[in-house]
Image: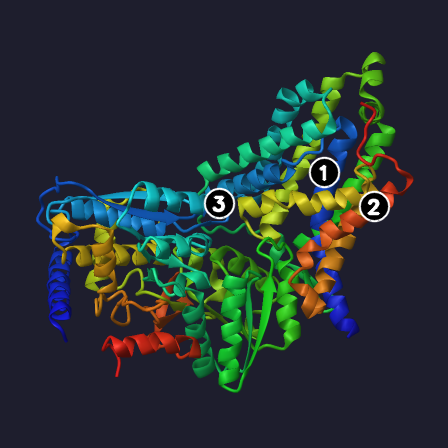
Amino acid sequence: MMTVYGLFMVSGLAVGSLYALGGIGLVILRRSTGFLNFSYGAIAAFSAMTAWQISQWGAPVPVAWIGAVLTGFVLSVTFGYALAPRLSHREPAIKAVATLGYLLILLGLMGLLWDHSLRRLDLPTDRIAVMVLGVRVTVTRLIVLGLAISAVIAMIVYLDRTRTGLNMRALADNRGHAALLGVPILRVETIAWGISGAMAGLTGVFFGSLVRLDPTVITFMVIPALAAAICGRLTSLPMTLIGGLFIGVVESMLALFPTLSAYRTMAPYIIAGLIILWMQRGNKLTFATGD
Amino acid sequence: MNLRMTTAAMTCGLLAFATAAKADSGGPVCGLNTGEAATGEPIRVGGISGNAPPGDFSGGTRAAAAYFACVNANGGIHGRPIAYSVGNDQWNPELAGQIASRLVEDEGVVALVGNGSVVEMAVNAELYAEHGVMAMASGCAISECFESANIVSTNQGPLPSGIGALRFAIEELGAEHAACIGFNIPNNGGWACDWMNRYMEQHGLRGTSILMDPTSVDLNGTYLQALASGADTILLMLPAGPAIGLLGVAEEQAGRDMFNWVSPTPLYEPGVTEVLGDYWDGHIYINIELNQFDSDGADNRNWIAVMDAHGRDGDRRDTFSQAGYLSARFFVEALLELDPESIDRASVTDAIRGIVGAESDLLCGPFYVGDGDRHMPNHRGRMVVLRGDAFELVRNCFDIDTAYLEPILEQERRLGLRD
């Protein structure tokens, strides 16, 4: 029985690391700009489709990866530079709705550019694997987990040790005060959008390879990613990582119980809901910012 | 055989002969095939299909549109062209209902042809019955589509196609315990997998349903569920996209040889061989509801000729497209039996219900409608295996034997199509 649990746990960690990676990208942006970016999944999907398109043109895999990261960067910065500053003084809900609009634009654009044909995004790392508790874990999945952990460490160091990181933290604390202190708001926010977009690009490529290359499916992976981010209270990167992995493992383990297995996709939302309730216990407004 | 059936059979025979002769010459054959454009008062016909993420079921309405365009360029219905109006339900039940109301109540269409959707039939079956209008569908995937008096489809849907695949797995691959992996949708995956399990039990074997949420990301968990169930056969009761995702997980887990892999028609789609690659060569068996896309049959060649001549760039050339062509062809043949001046909804509904014994090399048996409270005329299948960059026929037309078909077979006996 332990072997079966091990199988599902390892499988869950693999999916959870994808949720965590998405959640980390959301938290980085939320901390620096106050935006809860619902278009994160659409940016990831657009990037993954771009990577597929580049590979169809015969370009080597690294070029496709770079193309995906650049696409994510450009799409994210486009919104962050052109529209986000005009909404900077609006309520968090309005900012979030604006990103929902961007999601719909990107989804429509993908529908125009790519039809519903079947596609597959293969990575060279899909073919190399190690056995962990009886599950064959590909190097691609290990990279995702490693990337999620590395992103958390790198961002903590970046935010703590660099001038831009300090500026980002200042913006997160109070945008108005940061502006009075001379923080170059537009530049710092654009960097945050760029980092988040590049992460979305990478997430999209991995998601397209490990789950399936379907713009809609990748677009709506933002929802479980958001659940992971909520586990980190939209601010804590390590808790987002742990939350994503936890959600993935719970979702996977529910497959062991026949009566619950058909409903296991509810796991991210139930876990996020319970965590919101837990966080509300002191009556503190969970998503309130200093604005 | 009464006079009406004799006349219908003779018309079908003549049209089939003309189809074969013209298809040999490369051009499409449609309706009266006069080469003269129809200029009379249009006959209004509707169609509803779903085309939005996550799937495109527009192949049926697009093929019907191409066939009707061909008919209109070839004499129409004794001089009257068909005005075909199509709506996209975008998988939205509210929108599906609005489109059907517009077509049936406002525009007064005489029938609907080529419908393909996973929501439209469940929403509109009652409306069609209430208004006495028939829907000759071509892309049915839910129970309501096969269990309604006013909807008849040229495609099989997941239930017979899946059971056909299971029958092959039992007889040729030695399947003893099949895991049916489908979507957790009561009138789709739940309905079909439930009948798969009954079929296995009927043969003294074991069936297990593994139902997943359509939005599920954790395909690895679904695969592991199948592994933990102890099944020796996996029946992929899924649309092509998720099925390919699951096969990707199985490939990642080196699971190809741990199961027999069978699937109903959705995996038989252009591009599947390329997407799946060499790993699955010779290991995936698929039940196909209509003849192979590259078959030499006259009607199949005519479908291609119609799409080439009257289709649009980007029109899908899949099973739904073949089925849409067939629905449109049978519909036109039924209309040609009528006095063109007295064509209205009631006479068209009667004409459609009067279709008996229509033939095509795309099908494995005669097509019929009749006045039953349910319709599933296409319930014989073929099996193909993925081989290299193509699909190879491994079993030609065979019966699908399930208790679900008992009322259907009884209808066929009443219509004189079965002893």
Q: Which residue is mark 1?
A: A25
| Mark 1 vs mark 3: in front | 3
Q: Residue furthest right?
A: A282
**For the residues tagged 3 and 2, is the chain the same?**
no
Q: Is residue A269 left or right of residue B419?
A: right
Give the numbered dot on residue A280. none
Classify residue B380 by image quadrant: bottom left
The amino acid at mark 3 is: Glu
- Residue A285 location (% of width, % of height): 84, 34
Q: Residue furthest front?
A: B130
Q: Chain of mark 3?
A: B
Q: Which residue is mark 3?
A: B94
Residue under the image location 28 percent in, 76 percent down? B412
Q: Quadrant of the C terminus of chain B?
A: bottom left
Q: Is residue B398 visible?
A: no
**For the residues tagged 1 and 3, is the chain the same?**
no
| Figure check: A87 above or below B13 | above
Q: Is residue B10 left or right of residue A263?
A: left
The amino acid at mark 2 is: Leu
- Distance from disc 1 to disc 3, alpha carbons, whole Å, reads 36 Å
Residue under the image location 66 percent in, 63 percent down? B221
Q: Which residue is mark 2?
A: A277
- Residue A260 location (% of width, % of height): 69, 64
| Mark 1 vs mark 2: in front | 2
Q: Chain of mark 2?
A: A
Tell me the element at label 2: helix
Q: Chain of mark 1?
A: A
- Residue A193 location (% of width, % of height): 69, 29
Q: Is residue B277 visible?
A: yes
The amino acid at mark 1 is: Gly
